[in-house]
Amino acid sequence: MDAKAIAVSLDERSKGYKEYPMTDKREDSPNILQFKTADGKIETVEITQSRGYRIVKRFFDIVLSLIALIVLSPVFLVTAIAIRLEDGEPVIFTQDRSGLDGSVFKMYKFRSMVKNAPELHKELLAQNELDGPAFKMKDDPRITKVGKFIRKTSIDELPQLVNIIKGDMSIVGPRPLPYNYLPWFKDEERVRHKVRGGLTGLAQVNGRNTAKWEKRFKYDKDYVENLSFLMDIKILFKTIKVVFEHKDIGARGVDAPPDFHVYRSGLTEKELLERGKSSEAKKTINAQR
């Protein structure tokens, strides 16, 4: 499928997609989404977030994130020093991610790869251990020694506390995915963008990054359709358990699914890079906004 075909596909899907935005005129403000499923059926999803839920959740997002930043400041300092000593600056890695309603924002992480990771990635494609579309590399040489540790302990995600305070993210919600994945979502999967993405979420405590993409999106959809403080609290406590047990951490393309745009396109990552497909698809999305 080339960039032109992607544009046609997106246009065809948008014809059967209706959206009724949230308002604050009622205590319970619904977001009603209608779309065609893969089998041609029309599905209606009503997402109800009470105004009280949104206000209180935002309040706790800010307060808990500020407390975490203060309490974990020694961890931030030690991690920053360790990264700089091993591979210099920058300490923080930023990437465009899809936020609320598919908007783009810069997500922060502690850098866990070498500085020339993008260039090295292209060279490693030739050494790919998998014949199919996924990039398979059990011991990825792009990941630093510090990077392996902070990924295993999820310390690399801590800078996203700043994203939460800024309003880009929430503590709990569907995990924000790279912005160039947007063209590859089915309409029913876009429901995940009707709430702020989270530092952790229902999918992350049920398989983390080893779960298949369809399963992750099902968990995201279940979360969005059943928003509640009780669910958020359960996810938070389960996250603590999962992180300390170091469960469900997989190597991309080995014991975890390949990148979503590679998986959904059915092409190899090398083919996507050569054709510039992800870049063209992103331009198509921007042109439709």
Image: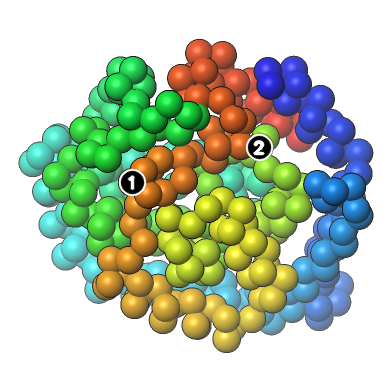
Q: On the rendered structure, is 142 left or right of 267? A: left
* SS at mark 2 in the image: helix
- Looking at the image, which residue sits at the far front? 131
Q: How is the image coloured?
A: rainbow
Based on the displayed image, in which of its 4 quarters is residue 79 positioned?
Answer: bottom left
Image location of residue 226, percent across then percent down: 69, 76
Q: How dense is the environment of label 2, judged by Cα within 10 Å: few (below 14), some, or many (20 and up)?
A: some
Mark 2 residue type: Trp
- Residue at point 21%, 33% (across, down): 141
Q: On the rendered structure, is 71 left or right of 63? A: left
Distance from disc 1 to disc 2, alpha carbons, whole Å, reads 22 Å
* SS at mark 1 in the image: loop
Q: Nearer the viewer, residue 157 or 52?
A: 157
* Label placed on residue 251: 1
* Label placed on residue 184: 2
Image location of residue 126, percent across then percent down: 34, 17
- Residue at point 19%, 63% (across, down): 75
Q: Quadrant of the C terminus?
A: top right
Say whether residue 237 is visible: yes
